[in-house]
Amino acid sequence: MRRATALLGLLAALPFAAPASAQETDTPPKVALPPAEGEFRPGLGVETSHELGDPLGLPLSGEELDRAVAEVAADIRCPKCQALSIADSGAASAQAMRAEARSLLSQGYTREQVVGYFEQRYGEFVLLEPRARGLNLIVWAAPAAIVLVGGLLVALRLRQRRRSADEGLDTYLRQVEQETAT
């Protein structure tokens, strides 16, 4: 009975026990996104180039790399914040995505390849500006269609008013002619 009680006590305390090797550090832990299905990353035993193909651009560095990362980050939606780009978000996942974009751009992948990589990983939702194809055409065409239909309705209404005003004027002129003729 004592052994069972001691064993239960140890099992109950297990979730609260810190590992002996755990030490508190001043630096925040690095957050790495888990690989997506079919994703290949260096360090995981497979090359990134299998998924993205060969880099089509030149490796970037310095200010040029910073500018390219900022451009890509402005077009990618933060998966946690959803209303912000990864450039504007402070979430750990956004920071990891920016770091991943920086790494890919520094290896020579083009902006289109990097954006395509994130789109393939997270779906089209990750793009802040949806592409004009498929059902997304509704998003692009609806405002123009609404303006066009509204313009047609206004034009038809003005035409009706002009006709009724012209008819009223014609009636008045006929009446004046009849009264002056007599």
Image: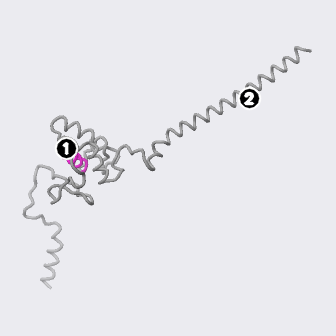
Write down the quadrant of residue 149 in the picture.
Answer: top right
Question: What's under tag 1, amino acid-wise?
Answer: Gly
Give 84 or 130, whichever is nearer the viewer: 130
Q: Is residue 37 above or below residue 147?
A: below
Instruction: Indicate yes or no whether the magenta region holds residue 178.
Output: no
Q: Please state, as top left, top right, bottom left or bottom right, where the N terminus lies in the image.
A: bottom left
Kindly report the secondary structure that dominates the magenta region of the rendered protein. Answer: helix
From the viewer's perspective, tell me whether residue 86 is left or right of residue 146.
Answer: left
Query: What residue did someone put label 2 on?
Result: 164
Residue 144 position in % (x across, y down): 50, 38
Residue 13 position in % (x across, y down): 16, 70
Question: What's under tag 2, amino acid-wise?
Answer: Ser
Q: How many numbered discs sit on the rendered protein?
A: 2
Give 10 or 148, whichever is nearer the viewer: 148
What SS does tag 2 mark? helix
Circle nearer the N terminus (2, 1): 1
Mark 2 → mark 1, Cα distance in angstroms: 69 Å
From the viewer's perspective, tell me whether residue 176 is left or right of residue 165.
Answer: right
- Colouring rule applied to residues: one colour
Residue 141 position in % (x across, y down): 48, 42
